[in-house]
Image (cartoon, rainbow, N blue to C red):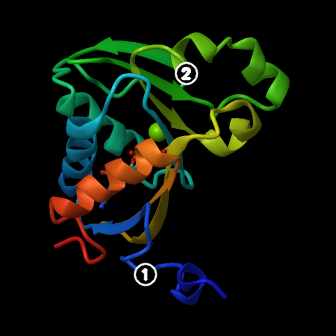
Amino acid sequence: MSPNEARPPSSPDRIGYLEQVTHSPDDTQRLGTRIAELARPGDVFLLMGNLGTGKTCLTQGIAWGLGIKEYTLSPSFVIVRELYGRLPLYHIDLYRLDNLAEIADLGLDEYLYGNGICVIEWAEKGLELLPREHLLIEIDYLADTERRFRLKASGQRYREMVNELKGQGVNATGH
Ligand SMILES: Nc1ncnc2c1ncn2[C@@H]1O[C@H](COP(=O)(O)OP(=O)(O)OP(=O)(O)O)[C@@H](O)[C@H]1O
Ligand SMILES: [Mg+2]
């Protein structure tokens, strides 16, 4: 067993892994804002979590962190929203799509491999079509105002990003 495997999966020391519990929508938005401050052109953030766990709330924070002021909650039939701040933000919501063919038809590559930031809600629906290097953010409902965010980096770029977030004191306990 390698030293990495010896650590429990939720260990805060695991490279490219960060866990944080938020205690309010504001708290979740702040996490999004911190992520946005470290974002670079071409970044892809995949959000996974059940209905109402806080994916859009986090995205709102990301938008604010990119200097996008006019972010409002969109009607759910909008699949791709383009917003412009320090970098473009492509907010993609796959909720209403039923299969991979429908997702392939969206022609997401111009967003995914462009110079903006892609944030994708319900990414699990299209995982096979999405870049292998990404920051995966899994969200769990813990209680009415409590959500757990697990950030998992795939690829060096995102490992560095998670490392920077840890350096800012965003740690396993969220304090
Ligand atoms: N700690 C928390 N973090 C985020 N949202 C919270 C928290 N506590 C309560 N909430 C509430 O949970 C709801 C989350 O809604 P949000 O639209 O962000 O979820 P979602 O994951 O995007 O849902 P959907 O699957 O419908 O897209 C909001 O009403 C928000 O106020
Ligand atoms: Mg949503």
Neighbours of disc 2 within 10 Å: few (<14), some (14-19), many (20+): many
> What x and y, as percent, mark residue 67?
16, 23
Q: Is mark 2 on a helix, strand or loop?
A: helix
Relative to 17, is 101 on the left or the right?
A: right
Q: Residue at x 44, y 24 (%)?
A: 42
Q: Which residue is drawn at 71% across and 35% down?
A: 126
Q: Do the residues labelled 2 and 1 touch (CB within 8 Å)?
A: no
Q: What residue type is labelled 1?
A: Ser
Quarter of the rendering occupied by the N terminus: bottom right
Above or below 118: residue 11:
below
* Number of on-image labels: 2
Q: Which residue is drawn at 28% across and 18% down?
A: 87
Q: Residue at x 21, y 41 (%)?
A: 33
Q: Residue furthest front?
A: 2
Q: Nearer the viewer, residue 102 or 134?
A: 134
Residue at the spot of label 1 = 11
Residue at the spot of label 2 = 112
Q: Which of 159 and 151 is in front in this view?
A: 159
> What x and y, as percent, mark residue 10?
47, 79
The quarter holding residue 117 reads top left
Relative to 103, is 171 on the left or the right?
A: left
> What x and y, as percent, mark residue 121?
53, 38
Quarter of the rendering occupied by the C terminus: bottom left
Q: Which of 168 and 71 is in front in this view?
A: 168
Q: Which amino acid does label 2 sit on?
A: Leu
| Separation of marks 2 and 1 at Cα, in angstroms | 30 Å
Regarding residue 174, the answer to whether it shows in the image is yes
Q: Is mark 1 on a helix, strand or loop?
A: loop
